[in-house]
Amino acid sequence: MRLLPATGTTAGKGLRKVTECRLPRVALLLETSTEYGRGLLRGIVKYVRLHGPWEYSVAPGHFEHALPRPSAWSGHGIIARVRSAEVANLIRQTGVPFVASSLVESGPLVHGDRFGEIRTDSQAIAVMAAEHLLEQGLRQFAFCGFIGCPWSQRRENAFRRTIESAGFPCYTYRVRMSNWLQSSSWMKTWEQEQPVLVEWLKALPKPVGVMACNDSCGCEVLQACARAQLRVPDDVAVVGVDNDEMMCEVSSPQLSSVALDLERAGYMAAKLLDDLMSGKECEERLVRVQPTHVVARQSTDVIALRDPVVANALRFIRNHSGKPIGVPEVAEGVGVCRRTLERRFFRALGRSPLKEIARCRVDRAKRLLLETELPHHRVAAAAGFGSLKAFHRTFFEIAGIAPGSFRRAGKTSLVGEPSPTLASSPAKRITAIGA
């Protein structure tokens, strides 16, 4: 499709000023078939409800979006998920300000002063996934990603570095993206890919923790495990990325996934575009999509430890993470004295039972902060903390960020100001698990 400059544009810029018409006309070229696109759209809608209105041009679907014809649209801005250089060129030819999320993420889309970019923090995402698998006591790890996909490669590299820094090997495999992009030949491609993926999974040392580059890839891994007659999570534990609830919940077993702050990113992308359309100077034109937490489901519900006492203690702690238990209750629950439990726990995991209790409480608190509107004192009680003061202190010590800041960073800012990002908190220290 050949694009012409929007009608009524100013010379040299191809841009009609927003003030010349009643409403800004914005094209939203984001896929509604994935949680990534839907999450960004939810954030955009929240921004426009507060600071709009805008006149939208949006077409439901996957990645095959067409720009509105200039003769019928005469728009002022675009927010898009860019699949290829061709699409990027078409967007540039419109001459209007745009904010784009690139599937390649290999560098800035253009050199200019009227564009912004949305990028996922692949480093932080991979570290969070690695920590989740390490916490299950696993000692073998692997990554499955897409061929020729820079953001998948970044996640693979960061995951491998994190695992290797903990003292363990990491195996990798890459599949074609046809299934995810829903190309016309995706079924034929998947029929060719699946047997190879099956053999790779069979050859991995067991039990193994696998990070998939996103939820679509994670579902492919689960399907291949079923064909290979591998038990999930006992033989292969799998974690994806995006937390696409529909995809994760209908998977068999249900897929664990790293959740992203997509709504906040969509909100800030809309604010950035609004500023660009208004002619404001924007020094920061990069919107980061940060991970918030791991939504643990059946695919990683495993404790891969040789010491049955420690394995049982971990199950006891996780099953009672919402109760005010201490180390004595855990020791009694698994039938050993406190000293024995602490010695064996540290030998197996490199941390104390008390640290594990605190970690599980903070994980539970994170979910409550992001998924409910409970006030802090009720979150503290529901996560097993004895007081609000203890909750705030422990949460900051482990997460590196205050509970209130964590909640704001994981949700859309309603005042249009950037909230503290989760990536700004100190990275958790990875401790190698003892043999």
Image (cartoon, rainbow, N blue to C red):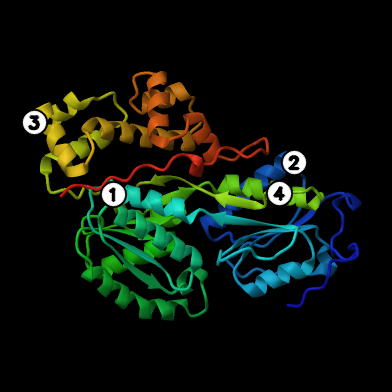
Mark 4 or mark 2, which is nearer to you? 4
Mark 2 or mark 1, which is nearer to you? 1
Picture coordinates of residue 165 (x, y %)?
31, 53
Q: Mark 2, residues whose alpha carbon is within 10 Å: few (<14), some, or many (≥20)?
A: some
Q: Which mark is residue 336?
A: 3
In the rendered view, does 187 fall on the left or right side of 109?
left
Q: Earlier in the sequence, mark 2 or mark 1?
A: 2
Q: Mark 4, residues whose alpha carbon is within 10 Å: few (<14), some, or many (≥20)?
A: few
Mark 2 secondary-structure assignment: helix
- Residue 78 location, quadrant: bottom right
Residue named by callout 1: 134
Q: Amino acid at mark 1?
A: Leu
- Residue 93 location, quadrant: bottom right
Q: Mark 3, residues whose alpha carbon is within 10 Å: few (<14), some, or many (≥20)?
A: some
Residue shown at the point (17%, 38%) measured from the top left? 345
Q: Earlier in the sequence, mark 4 or mark 2?
A: 2
In the rendered view, does 264 fall on the left or right side of 175?
right
Question: Distance between the Cα atoms at labels 1 and 4?
Answer: 39 Å
Mark 1 or mark 4, which is nearer to you? 4
Q: Earlier in the sequence, mark 4 or mark 3?
A: 4
Mark 3 secondary-structure assignment: loop
Q: Which mark is residue 51?
A: 2
Q: Are marks 4 and 2 in contact (CB under 8 Å)?
A: no
